Image (cartoon, helix red, strand yellow):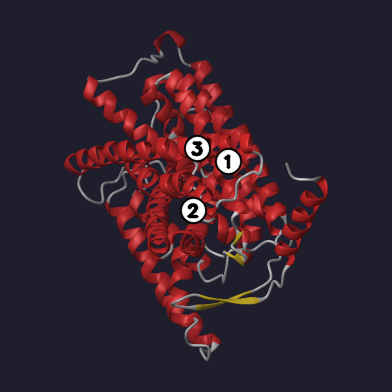
Amino acid sequence: MISTKEAEKDKRQEFRDDEKDQATVITTADSAVEVHEGKGTWKHAAFHVATTIATPAAYAPLPFALASLGWPLGVSSLVGATLATWYSSLLIASLWRWNGKKQITYRHLAKSIFGFWGYWSIAFFQQVASLGNNIAIQIAAGSSLKAVYKYYHEDGGLTLQHFIIFFGAFELFLSQLPDIHSLRWVNALCTFSTIGFAGTTIGVTLYNGRKINRNSVNYSLQGSSSLKTFKAFNALGAIAFSFGDAMLPEIQHTLRKPAKKNMYKGVSAAYGIIILTYWQLAFSGYWAFGSEVQPYIVASLTIPEWTIVMANLFAVIQISGCYQIYCRPTYAYFEEKKLWRNSNCIPFKYRLIRLVFTSIYIFLITLIAAAMPFFGDFVSICGAIGFTPLDFVFPAIAHLKSGKMPQKTKFRALMQLVNFAIATWFSIVAFLGCIGAVRFIVEDIRTYKFFHDM
């Protein structure tokens, strides 16, 4: 047992740790990165986390995922993933100042706990998550822009590829903003757009569902036994994608002291939004359309058209902020390796180098999204290979290895059991989701030509 006096002493020490000098220099084996004082509040953290996770591209495949799993397994998978990622996010927040040092990026946190291989493993998974997420959401943004265009110009000649390119050009402009904190007002707007998209889509989905002959709606799993199995695997990857957030330490670094407390509040507030919107959209979408629901839920909606246009506009606004959040690990890695080494780099040269690099990055993302606009497939493989290790497996294992466990034996054993169960189960989910996603990507490549106007 720990005395009350000792507990208070530990709490004061933790608070002092969180308040230690905010402007420092963290030196790693390969770089020196200047760390500036964070300015964000818990509300900014909530905006960033909600923007990163709750995107239309994350909402949109959930009814389709439920249709691939059925009601019992679908509901339990969705609820379980929600609770697991909220818990895992709090674990990562608790490790932000671990071993006496601030861990300002996911990569540095992994390196401090697991060493060299931890750094490069997280770097790999972050890049997979970043690239896969941005490909998927750029396809979604292009689809939404095309839907708005077709509403006003039904016979217009612009294709999905045109709108994917337009969106990429806008993201190149936003990419010139220096850091995540400079996006705070963009992300505040995106958070409200998230609520707008969810509210509009849920309302229109329920309206469409009431207009459909309910006797014609089928909830049974479709296809052969093997197809059902692969669709279930694919759905697990899609659900993992829907809770993807590979940027928690980077977001926490933007917060003012006490950063840990602000991050706890921000994460919990963001998950409050997620629970209110994710579950309602997933359940209402599956209820309305059954097994016929489309991978991108908005594509299943038919009336009233003006509300569908509004939902698509909300989607584009929200995706514009999420895209930027997921660009930042790549930009940060480039700057860490190339720009910070040259302390004499003049501002104009810095901006020019940044423009060239961000142009190359966005060109590649845009090219892949335009060539293979298979939204559902990229969602699943990104969720399986990128987000599942980052958001479910790594936090649980890192917390176990760090030794930051409750002092009481009963609570310590319970937390160890929960962490082990999450790491084991979601490792299986990653493997199965990858199998399902690869299978459907191969099928789509055989079915469609490159640059197909979906």
Q: Observer-nearest residue: 294 or 6?
A: 6
Q: Which mark is residue 87?
A: 1
Among numbered discs 3 and 1, the one appearing first in the sequence: 3
- Marks 2 and 1 sit apart, C-alpha to C-alpha, by 15 Å
Q: Position of residue 149 (x, y in %)?
A: 44, 46
Between 248 and 311, the residue placed more toward the observer is: 248
Q: Amino acid at mark 1?
A: Tyr
As drawn, the residue found furthest toward the top would be 215
Vertical relation: 1 (above or below) 181: above
Coordinates of residue 295 in the picture (x, y in percent): 38, 34
The circle on residue 246 is: 2
The secondary element bearing badge 2 is classed as loop
Q: How many numbered discs, if any?
A: 3
Crowding at mark 2 (Cα within 10 Å: few <14, some 14-19, many 20+)? many
Q: Nearer the viewer, residue 88 or 176?
A: 88
Closer to the N terminus: mark 2 or mark 3? Answer: 3
- Using the image, determine if residue 132 lies above or below residue 354: above
Q: Residues within 10 Å of mark 1 (few under 14, many from 20)?
A: some
Q: Quadrant of the N terminus?
A: top right
Which residue occupies 76% across, 53% down?
Answer: 11
Residue annotated with mark 3: 59
In this rendering, would 252 be left or right of 361?
A: right
Frontmost of labels 2 and 3 is 2
Q: Amino acid at mark 3?
A: Tyr
Disc 2 residue type (three-letter): Ala
Choose the circle earlier in sequence order: 2 or 1.
Answer: 1
